[in-house]
Structures are given as structure tokens and as C-alpha cells.
Image: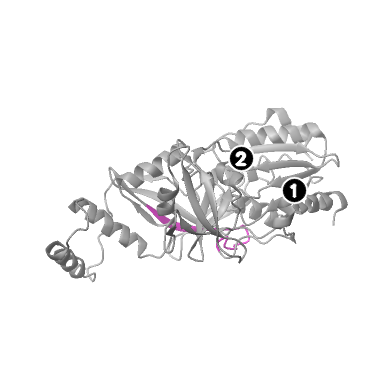
């Protein structure tokens, strides 16, 4: 329960440093990192002297001397450099490390601002296949029936083999009222088509409900800039409900701001408790993000957190922190496993480079990327359940809070 001495109506959320939340096609691109845009185009070090650029120079010369274009479109030398840089980024084999030429940089930054039209889902690369992380509730993708875990093997009839998330975003985005066709494989079945009509994306954040059995359910759909205040308001509603049973529903929540995940975890954890650690590799010191210690709940609180394969990034950070600090029990299905940290660097005034710089570790040192977060109580939600509008995961969580088992 909430400690009455905490003064639920008087809570102040302060000191929040919002980093960035990148949308595309109405999706969150990866997870937020340290500083979103770092300085200018200066390069601190050159490639090692052992690197032989002769291959690149010779290939450039051979192309210049021999290539005959299939169209009348001229390719500038600048565009050739952009293409080479995109290939360099792609050579690292990480779908989240991407070079943005000017058009793509503008697309990415418009997604950061949130002024976009699309279908309303997060996508990611899993096992080298373009995968739906989560359709956002109420969006065209959600209404059309796309589901977390769907494999997208073609967009408008064009194969997605070897595609990056950013390239997929460019294919999927488009003018409101136009349609995009997805070829999808679901749960090992045969490919089928889903057509989605693009629209302006209005992203949901928080919904609450008090069930007849006294269980308060807080549905959290994203970790955006509005989430801290909306979560605070929801906690005030929970206090007014005078119950000790709380479910936080993170299913289909693709993540967002790192700092919002830390802020929300701070409502449940004492000051200084580790929420998540950024692992930068062998030669760089890890960075721990710790609770700010709002910690307004007494030890009488009964908390369950719902997760599924659509819970990614910041959702996994919050779920792992609450479970491993002994605050809540995870119920549902294994999460997506998006545990890498991206940072965006300016290369020139009109180009940028998004680079994976670290990986998330839970408070106990477990990698989120290593298979995601496994729930304490596994409950499947089948296609038949969805068809019949049943929610066995939510019902199991309520049962656990009421009976303790």
C-alpha cells in the first residue's frame, strides 16, 4: 500500500533528465542512451594505419570507368560517400547501428519530435528477421490485427531479407489514407497478407481500472515524455482506491525513455537501489542508474507485473528491476529482449550515425539481450483467447494477488 505519510497528492517528480524517444512508423526505435546528439563532426581518431583503402579507391575508379546507369538519374559523389558509409555501418552486423544520410536524418528527427504518419507499431530485428515487437493500442496496425511476434517477410510485395529497421521504416511510412501491405508469418504458420491504412498516430500512455475483486490495474503503453506525470496521477488513483493489490501491465509496451523507466521504478525502490546498468565493454566502466527513492509504498503492497513478447527495452528494464529487487512478481510470457543502447552522433550538419554503445544489465547483472526477461509465472495468451476476448494472463495475475499463489 501507499504510505499515508508520503502524502500521495503532494508527490513531486523532480530532476528528470529526458533523453530521447525515437519513433518511426509510429514505433520506438531501439532504446534511449546517454546523450542523444553529441557535438559536431570532429573525429577523435582516424582508422588504424593498417587499414588499406586501396580496395575502396580501386572499386570507385572501376565503377566510374565502367558503370552504365539503368536510369537517367545521376548519382553524385556525395551520395556515393553516403552509400559507402552506410555499408561501413552495416558491416558491423548490428541492425541498430545505422548511418543516416540527409533524408533519413530528417525522418529520424521528425520521429523524435513525434510529428509523423504511419501504422503505429514497433518493429525490430530478431534472428535476422523483421519482427513486430508490438502494435500500439488503438493504432492502424493494432486494428488491422498485427500481433507481437509476427514475422514480416515482405512489405508491398518486396522481400525484407537483410533489411534494417530504418529501411523498413522508410518503406512503411507514407501519407495518411494510403495503404501498405505486409506479408506475415505467425507462430510457424503459412504466410498471409495484412493491409494497413496509414493514419496520424496518437500514442496511448496510461489507462487504469479498478476491478470488482479489488485489484487495481495500471496499463502502461509507453515510456514517453508524458509518462512520469500520468504514472503519478495513476498512483494517486490507486491510493484513492484503498486497495493493496496492483497490476502493472507492460504487455505490448515497446519502451521509450530510459530516464522514465528509472523514474517509475523509483516509486517502488529505496534511494540508491540499482534499476539498470549500462555495460560498455571491457575497457569502459559500467554506469549504474539508481532509484531516486520516492519509495512511497509500504511492505503491504502486492504487486504483479504483466509482460509478453511485446514488452521491450524500457519495459524490460522496469520489469527486471522490480523483480530482482524483490518488489513484484512477473507474470505472462518472455519479453522481447531489446537490451542494447544506442547513441546518435552528428557526422556532418545534415548526416548522423546511430551506434550501439552499450548493453543493458538487470540489477543482478543479467543481460536483457540474452533471451529477454522470463516471467516467474508463465501464462500463454493464445489466438483463441484473443478471438474470444479472454485474458488469462490478467486473470492469473489477479488470482496471484488475491490468493498469494
Residue 2, image quadrant? top right
How many discs appear? 2
Magenta span has 358? yes
Q: Position of residue 355 (x, y in %)?
A: 40, 55
Query: Would residue 39 be seen by someone viewing this image from the given angle?
Result: no
Give coordinates of residue 62: x percent, y percent: 15, 67
Local packing at callout 1 (Cα closer than 10 Å; few below 14, some 14-19, many 20+) is: few
Q: Is residue 223 left or right of residue 107?
A: right
Q: In the rendered view, would you say 33 is above or below 339? A: above
Q: Of residues 124 and 69, which is closer to you in this image?
A: 69
Q: Earlier in the sequence, mark 2 or mark 1?
A: 2
Please state, as top left, top right, bottom left or bottom right, where the C terminus lies in the image: bottom right
Tag 2, which secondary structure?
loop
* Residue 221 lies within the magenta run: no
Q: What residue is at 26 percent from the left and 49 percent from the top?
A: 42
- What residue is at 44 percent from the left and 40 percent from the top? 112
Residue at (67% x, 62% y) in the render: 374
Residue assigned mark 1: 389
Q: Which mark is residue 254?
A: none
Residue situated furthest right in the rendering: 403
Q: Which mark is residue 138?
A: 2
Q: Which portion, as a residue range, is magenta?
A: 354-369
Amino acid at each position: 500500500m501507499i504510505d499515508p505519510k508520503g502524502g500521495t497528492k503532494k508527490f513531486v517528480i523532480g530532476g528528470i533528465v529526458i533523453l530521447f524517444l525515437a519513433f518511426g512508423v509510429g514505433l520506438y526505435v531501439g532504446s534511449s542512451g546517454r546523450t542523444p546528439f553529441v557535438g559536431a563532426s570532429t573525429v577523435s581518431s582516424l582508422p588504424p594505419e593498417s587499414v588499406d583503402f586501396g580496395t575502396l579507391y580501386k572499386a570507385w575508379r572501376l565503377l566510374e570507368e565502367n558503370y552504365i546507369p539503368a536510369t537517367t538519374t545521376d548519382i553524385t559523389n556525395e551520395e556515393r560517400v553516403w552509400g559507402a558509409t552506410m555499408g561501413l555501418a552495416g558491416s558491423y552486423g548490428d541492425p541498430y547501428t545505422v548511418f543516416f544520410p540527409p533524408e533519413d536524418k530528417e525522418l529520424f528527427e521528425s520521429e523524435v519530435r513525434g510529428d509523423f504518419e504511419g501504422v503505429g507499431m514497433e518493429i525490430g530485428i530478431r534472428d535476422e528477421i523483421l519482427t513486430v515487437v508490438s502494435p500500439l493500442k488503438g493504432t492502424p496496425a493494432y486494428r488491422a490485427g498485427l500481433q507481437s511476434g509476427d514475422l514480416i517477410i515482405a512489405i508491398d510485395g518486396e522481400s525484407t531479407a537483410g533489411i534494417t529497421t530504418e529501411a523498413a521504416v522508410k518503406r512503411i511510412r507514407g501519407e495518411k489514407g494510403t495503404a501498405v501491405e505486409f506479408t506475415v508469418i505467425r507462430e510457424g504458420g503459412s504466410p498471409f497478407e495484412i493491409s494497413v491504412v496509414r493514419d496520424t498516430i496518437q500514442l496511448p500512455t496510461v489507462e487504469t481500472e479498478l476491478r470488482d475483486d479489488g485489484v487495481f490495474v495500471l496499463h502502461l503503453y509507453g515510456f514517453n515524455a508524458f509518462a512520469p506525470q500520468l504514472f503519478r496521477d495513476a498512483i494517486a488513483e490507486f491510493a484513492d482506491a484503498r486497495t493493496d493489490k496492483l497490476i502493472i501491465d507492460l504487455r505490448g509496451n515497446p519502451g521509450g525513455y530510459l530516464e522514465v523507466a528509472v523514474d517509475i521504478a523509483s516509486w517502488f525502490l529505496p534511494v540508491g537501489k540499482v534499476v539498470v546498468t549500462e555495460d560498455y565493454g571491457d575497457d569502459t566502466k559500467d554506469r549504474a542508474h539508481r532509484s531516486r527513492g520516492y519509495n512511497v509504498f509500504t511492505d503491504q503492497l502486492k504487486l504483479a507485473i504483466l509482460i509478453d513478447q511485446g514488452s521491450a527495452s524500457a519495459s524490460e528494464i522496469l520489469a527486471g528491476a522490480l523483480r530482482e529487487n524483490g518488489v513484484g512478481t512477473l507474470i505472462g510470457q518472455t519479453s522481447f529482449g531489446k537490451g542494447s543502447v544506442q547513441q546518435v552522433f552528428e557526422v556532418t550538419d545534415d548526416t548522423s550515425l546511430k551506434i550501439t554503445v552499450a548493453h543493458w544489465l538487470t540489477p543482478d547483472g543479467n543481460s536483457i539481450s540474452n533471451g529477454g526477461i522470463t516471467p516467474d509465472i508463465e501464462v500463454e495468451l493464445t489466438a483463441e483467447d484473443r478471438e474470444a476476448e479472454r485474458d488469462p494472463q490478467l486473470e492469473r495475475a489477479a488470482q496471484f494477488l488475491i490468493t498469494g499463489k
